[in-house]
Image: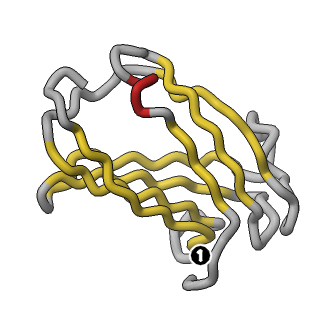
């Protein structure tokens, strides 16, 4: 929606160079209870989709993340690591869109973040 959300996402760019674990901090005040949460992550370079990733983070049963179950209006403040194989990004401007949905059909979006990542070196 067009209403301003209280949302902060922080990833320190220099800490990601040649590091297999990225440290991330997230602060968000959701406008609905978080019982189900699906995250969709898209990366675009020059109009071409470079990466597409989806994951159900909260399913409502046996969730492994403490953030699942956060109630509407509560401040969700968390830090986590992003681990795994890293993509080598060539120089360029990347449009990154992160969406979160409260349903598996992706019809009820609860947040959408759109930002640009600028890679200035080939060895990122």
Q: Where residue 67 appears, x then y in whole percent?
A: 78, 45
* 72 over 10 or under it: above or below: below
The residue drawn where x is 56% and y is 43% is 10
Residue 116 sits in quarter: bottom left
Judging from the image, what secondary structure is the residue with disc 1 in? loop
Q: Where residue 113 appears, x then y in whole percent?
A: 48, 62
71 relative position to 115: left or right? right
Give the quarter of the figure containing the C terminus. Answer: top left
The residue drawn where x is 53% and y is 76% is 107
Q: Where residue 82 appears, x then y in whole percent?
A: 52, 29
The residue drawn where x is 51% and y is 69% is 106
The residue drawn where x is 77% and y is 45% is 77
Residue 6 sits in quarter: bottom right
Q: Where residue 112 appears, x then y in whole percent?
A: 51, 66
How many residues crowd mark 1 within 10 Å: few (<14), some (14–19), many (20+)?
Answer: few
Viewer-closest of 58 and 49: 49
Residue beneath disc 1 = 108
Residue 70 sits in quarter: bottom right
């Amino acid at each position: 929606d067009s209403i301003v959300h209280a949302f902060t996402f922080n990833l320190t760019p220099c800490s990601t160079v040649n590091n297999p674990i990225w440290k991330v901090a997230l602060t968000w005040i959701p406008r609905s209870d978080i019982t189900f949460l699906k995250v969709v992550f898209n990366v675009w370079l020059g109009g071409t989709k470079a990466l597409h990733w989806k994951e159900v983070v909260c399913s409502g049963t046996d969730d492994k993340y403490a953030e699942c179950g956060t109630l509407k209006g509560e401040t969700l403040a968390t830090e986590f690591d992003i681990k795994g194989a890293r993509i080598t990004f060539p120089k360029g401007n990347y449009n990154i869109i992160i969406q979160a949905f409260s349903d598996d059909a992706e019809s009820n979006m609860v947040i959408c973040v759109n930002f640009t990542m600028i890679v200035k070196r080939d060895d990122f």
